[in-house]
């Protein structure tokens, strides 16, 4: 795969490939057929407060958590989004934000891509997912991987961030156990990482002048490079040992999902069924908070989907059907995980879906 590290405008030479973008009098570009571009800037949102305008703009994917004081404060943000086939790319500048992709949001939308954030300025101050897997960012530009099928809350400083969105099918051809990359951060400390950041930055510069075929190839290459980097960081790729570990994790997760509705499913029953060494199995799920936590969180996630997908099914039936010992145990676990009761979650999610 070729790294796109040149940072020049492809139109600078005065020549353009057939089907590429052409410059407009205002400096913008008419993109090639097959490349969809949208642009949004809070400076054009008056009389709506900029932060509320931004919340409305990105609210179909992620929630912007705001307070009354923050709404009154100065805020600016802009985003350019490019889409080619199943791949998408955004170039975003914004002030400081608290972002939340909750289980309610996931249960009511169809966004299931992986998002790879590359910070050119600023960075992620903190990120926490549904699993107890918190990482703190730094002042250096960082790379962050998110599985949009898992919840996460992020505190982001004022920044410029480029994001590559790739479908799960593409990501999982490179890393079979791709959901383990969720919430992971790679600091921009090594020559290889700096080269990867430069590659994605060059893509942002050159994308407006590319044909649809060129854009799709460049986006796919960027996605594959980012997936490979995070797969290596998570020790899911890179050598025979990593491949064996990924295969073992995949086997365990497949067994858990297949038996999720069985009340007797537990770490002990899994060890006995698969005949795997206990220390190895527990190390594999350390970043998930432990094997028992992983099983419980999968059950809670399945319960959230069923609460929305089967609105006439009693909460008690959902609890017993997913292996919880009692409705009260289920309600306590659900409230601890999502800070809302199952009944209130169902009401809120269904209202959001109707809107």
Image (spheres, rainbow, N blue to C red):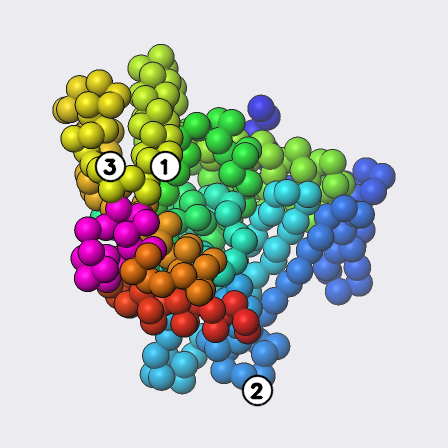
Asked if residue 98 is positioned above or below residue 296 in the image, the reply reads below
Q: Nearer the viewer, residue 253 or 102?
A: 253
Query: Is mark 1 in CB contact (under 8 Å) with mark 2?
Result: no
Q: Residue 47 carries which label?
A: 2
The reply to whether residue 329 is in sight is yes
Q: Mark 1 points at which residue?
A: 257
- In-image side of 158 versus 19 (left or right): left
Identify the residue shown where x is 50% and y is 34%.
Answer: 171
Locate residue 263, reporting x and y percent: 24, 42
Which residues are the magenta region? 318-334
> Are there few (<14), some (14-19), or many (20+) residues within 10 Å of tag 1?
some
Q: Mark 3 points at which residue?
A: 265
Identify the residue shown where x is 83% and y is 42%.
Answer: 19
Query: Is mark 3 in CB contact (under 8 Å) with mark 2?
Result: no
Answer with mark 1 or mark 2, whichever residue precedes in sequence. 2
Answer with mark 3 or mark 2, whichever residue precedes in sequence. 2
Q: Which of 145 and 317 is in front in this view?
A: 317
């Amino acid at each position: 795969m070729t790294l796109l590290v040149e940072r020049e405008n492809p139109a600078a030479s005065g020549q353009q490939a057939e089907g590429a973008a052409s410059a407009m009098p205002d400096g913008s570009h008419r993109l090639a057929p097959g490349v969809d571009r949208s642009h949004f800037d809070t400076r054009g949102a008056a009389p709506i407060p900029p932060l509320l305008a931004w919340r409305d703009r990105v609210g179909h994917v992620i929630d912007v958590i705001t307070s009354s004081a923050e709404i009154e404060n100065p805020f600016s943000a802009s985003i350019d989004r490019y889409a080619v086939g199943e791949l998408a790319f955004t170039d975003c500048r914004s002030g400081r934000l608290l972002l939340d992709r909750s289980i309610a949001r996931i249960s009511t939308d169809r966004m299931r891509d992986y998002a790879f954030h590359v910070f050119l300025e600023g960075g992620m101050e903190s990120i926490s997912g549904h699993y107890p897997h918190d990482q703190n960012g730094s002042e250096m530009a960082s790379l962050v991987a998110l599985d949009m099928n898992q919840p996460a809350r992020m505190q982001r400083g004022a920044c410029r961030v480029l994001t590559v969105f790739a479908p799960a099918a593409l990501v999982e051809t490179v890393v079979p156990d791709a959901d383990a990359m969720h919430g992971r951060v790679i600091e921009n400390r090594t020559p290889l990482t700096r080269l990867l950041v430069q590659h994605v930055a060059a893509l942002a510069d050159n994308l407006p002048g590319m044909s649809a075929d060129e854009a799709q190839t460049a986006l796919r290459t960027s996605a594959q490079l980012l997936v490979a980097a995070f797969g290596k960081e998570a020790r899911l790729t890179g050598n025979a040992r990593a491949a064996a570990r990924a295969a073992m994790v995949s086997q365990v997760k497949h067994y858990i999902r297949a038996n999720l509705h069985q009340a007797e499913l537990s770490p002990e029953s899994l060890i006995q069924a698969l005949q795997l060494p206990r220390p190895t199995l527990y190390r594999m799920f350390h970043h998930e908070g432990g094997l028992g936590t992983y099983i419980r969180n999968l059950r809670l996630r399945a319960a959230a989907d069923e609460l929305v997908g089967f609105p006439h099914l009693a909460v008690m039936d959902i609890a017993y059907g997913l292996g919880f010992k009692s409705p009260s145990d289920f309600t306590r676990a659900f409230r601890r995980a999502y800070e809302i009761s199952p009944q209130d979650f169902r009401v809120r999610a269904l209202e959001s879906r109707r809107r």
